[in-house]
């Protein structure tokens, strides 16, 4: 079908555009049924340098499923619901994530600079 070839050439074009604009090259990571692209701010501070491993996992899981609950996060990560909520609180205070809507019907949003 040629999908993989197109997939690769698109990534090469993205990297070329970032280099041309003298921006930090984004990171590409395989996740479940696709991939994640991490784009860094102009200050070139990586969000992943500011957060713990569990907080990184929370961000990745929210990117995969914005409606994920704290209980689901804690089960997947393997930490208590209380620790998960503490990590979520820290991510909110750092301006990395926010909750849109109610606990039951809402969703998570990764805040972009």
Image: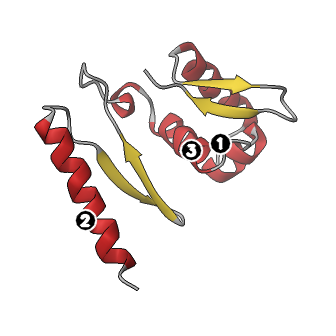
Residue shown at the point (64%, 23%) measured from the top left: 98
Q: Position of residue 102 (x, y in %)?
A: 84, 26
The 10 Å Cα crowd at callout 3, few under 14, some 14 to 19, many 20 or more, is some
Q: Secondary structure at mark 1?
A: loop
Q: CA distance from mark 3 to mark 2?
A: 24 Å
The front one of 102 and 51 is 102
The x and y percentages for residue 82 are 73, 30
Percent of width and height locating residue 80: 71, 38
- Read off the residue under disc 3: 63
> Is residue 86 depicted above or below 11 in this figure?
above
Q: How far apart, in angstroms, are the residues tagged by discs 1 and 3? A: 19 Å
Residue under label 2: 9
| Nearest the eye: 8 or 104 | 8
In this view, the residue in front, 70 or 102, is: 102
Rendered residue at 35%/76% (across/down): 4
Left/right of residue 55 with respect to residue 14 in the rendered view = right
Q: Residues within 10 Å of mark 1 (few under 14, many from 20)?
A: few
Marking on residue 79: 1
């Amino acid at each position: 079908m040629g999908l993989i070839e197109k997939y690769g050439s698109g990534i090469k074009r993205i990297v070329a555009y970032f280099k041309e604009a003298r921006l930090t090259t984004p990171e590409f990571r395989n996740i479940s049924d696709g991939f994640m692209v991490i784009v860094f701010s102009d200050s070139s501070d990586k969000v992943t340098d500011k957060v713990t491993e569990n907080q990184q996992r929370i961000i990745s899981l929210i990117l995969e499923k914005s409606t994920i609950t704290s209980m689901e996060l804690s089960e997947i990560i393997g930490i208590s619901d209380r620790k998960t909520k503490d990590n979520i609180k820290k991510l909110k205070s750092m301006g990395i994530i926010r909750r849109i809507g109610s606990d039951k019907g809402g969703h998570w949003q990764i805040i972009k600079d």
